[in-house]
Image: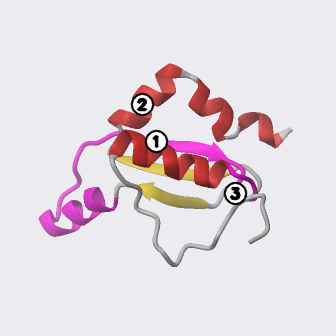
Amino acid sequence: MAEDWGAIEYLKDPENMRRLEAADVVFGVDVATAEKVLFYGREYFKRIVAEGTAAPGLIVEIPIVFESDEYEMLAGACVALKGRHDLDEGEPEMGGEAG
């Protein structure tokens, strides 16, 4: 079942949390569609564009179920470990609860 591979399981692993904390870029990848959303790392990409060269860095892709609370869970983990997330305010609202 796809939910078995989502953010909940990923974030339970201390090694994964260390990777997330060290990451320069964090993508959430929907397990159902493979769609990627940038959760953290906008400044990393801006620096590459400004300098005109690729920079070494750790890019982490975390499997999540977009149509669940894992979207908000990953955003919260980025805030807790990185100090912020880079989701646009225009990002579609995700989550299992009706608004």
Report the disc number at residue 66: 3
Q: Residue sitting at 48 percent across and 75 percent down?
A: 89
Q: Is residue 32 magenta?
A: no
Report the disc number at residue 19: 2
Image quadrant assignment for residue 21: top left
Magenta segment boundaries in residue numbering = 42-69
Q: CA distance from mark 2 to mark 3?
A: 21 Å
Percent position of residue 13, x then y: 57, 22
Q: CA distance from mark 1 to mark 2?
A: 7 Å
The nearer-to-camera label among 3 and 1 is 3
Q: Residue sitting at 67 percent across and 30 percent down?
A: 9
Image height check: is 52 above or below 73? Answer: below
What is the secondary structure assignment of the residue under circle 3? loop
Marks 1,2: beta carbons within 8 A:
yes
Marks 3,1: beta carbons within 8 A:
no
What is the secondary structure assignment of the residue under circle 1? strand
Q: Residue furthest top?
A: 14
Q: Left of 75 or right of it: where is 58?
A: left
Report the disc number at residue 60: 1
Q: What amino acid is found at the position of numbered circle 1 in the picture?
A: Val
Q: Left of 38 or right of it: where is 81?
A: left
Which sits in the foreground, 50 or 14? 14
Sequence-first disc among 2 and 3: 2
Q: Residue sitting at 52 percent across and 78 percent down?
A: 90
Q: What amino acid is found at the position of numbered circle 2 in the picture?
A: Arg
Mark 3 surroundings: few (<14), some (14-19) or many (≥20) residues within 10 A: many
Q: What amino acid is found at the position of numbered circle 3 in the picture?
A: Phe
